[in-house]
Amino acid sequence: MRRKKLLMTSCAGLAGAAVLLVSSCSSAAKRADLNKNGKISTEELNKALVKAVFEAADENRDGSVTFEEWKQVFPDSTKKKFQAHDLGKNGSFTLEEALTYCKKHKTFDKLVGKVDSNGDGIIDKEEAGKFQDKMAATQGDNEVQKLKTLAN
Ligand SMILES: [Ca+2]
Ligand SMILES: [Ca+2]
Ligand SMILES: [Ca+2]
């Protein structure tokens, strides 16, 4: 099945919607909880965001993102930025490469830090809820809806 195209004005917009998704949808939260301890750490949220953006970009679901796919999601981005993600320099990048890139460049650290408002490294329900309220005010329901469709 061909998935709906996800056009975002910015990576942060998409990431914001992903936070919403992880905090509001229990199946997404379960998947984000990688060590299955019932809590989502900032590191786990960070990985979940990279994964959400990666999966949104990998339109043909072959496990790698090409420049063409990248441009569909980030039309304003440059080839240089794409190539920075392509660590193996083979013309596309995998989720592993995306995770390495985002870790190195702290792509979502600021956003995740905002969600973890008490700074204890764990995203609790209250913090997720607070962030959800904040995002609802700035993020269109449309984007959130689109992400939910992708996650299911
Ligand atoms: Ca966990
Ligand atoms: Ca692909
Ligand atoms: Ca916290």
Image (spheres, rainbow, N blue to C red):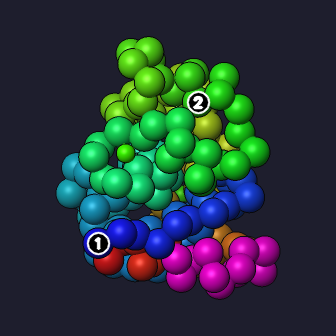
Res 127 seen here = no
* Residue under the image location 41 percent in, 31 percent down: 93
The amino acid beneath tag 2 is Phe
Res 25 seen here = yes
What mark, if any, has residue 1 been given in the picture?
1
Task: Identify the residue under disc 2.
Answer: 82
Q: Do the residues labelled 2 and 1 touch (CB within 8 Å)?
A: no
Which secondary structure, mark 1? loop
Segment colored magenta: 136-146
Which secondary structure, mark 2? helix
* Residue under the image location 39 percent in, 18 percent down: 90
* Residue under the image location 77 percent in, 80 percent down: 137
The amino acid beneath tag 1 is Met
Task: Give how far across and how far down residue 41 sits, in percent.
Answer: 41, 51
Quadrant hosting residue 96: top left
Q: Nearer the viewer, residue 114 or 52?
A: 52
Quick one: quadrant of the N terminus? bottom left
CA neighbours of label 2 inside 10 A, class few (<14), some (14 to 19), many (20+): some
Q: Is residue 138 above or below residue 82?
A: below
Q: Is residue 45 above or below residue 102?
A: below
Q: Is residue 48 above or below residue 7?
A: above
Q: Nearer the viewer, residue 89 or 140?
A: 89
Give the residue at the far left of this rendering. Answer: 36
Query: Is residue 151 in the magenta section?
Result: no
Quick one: quadrant of the C terminus? bottom left
Q: In which quarter of the image is ligand 3?
A: bottom right
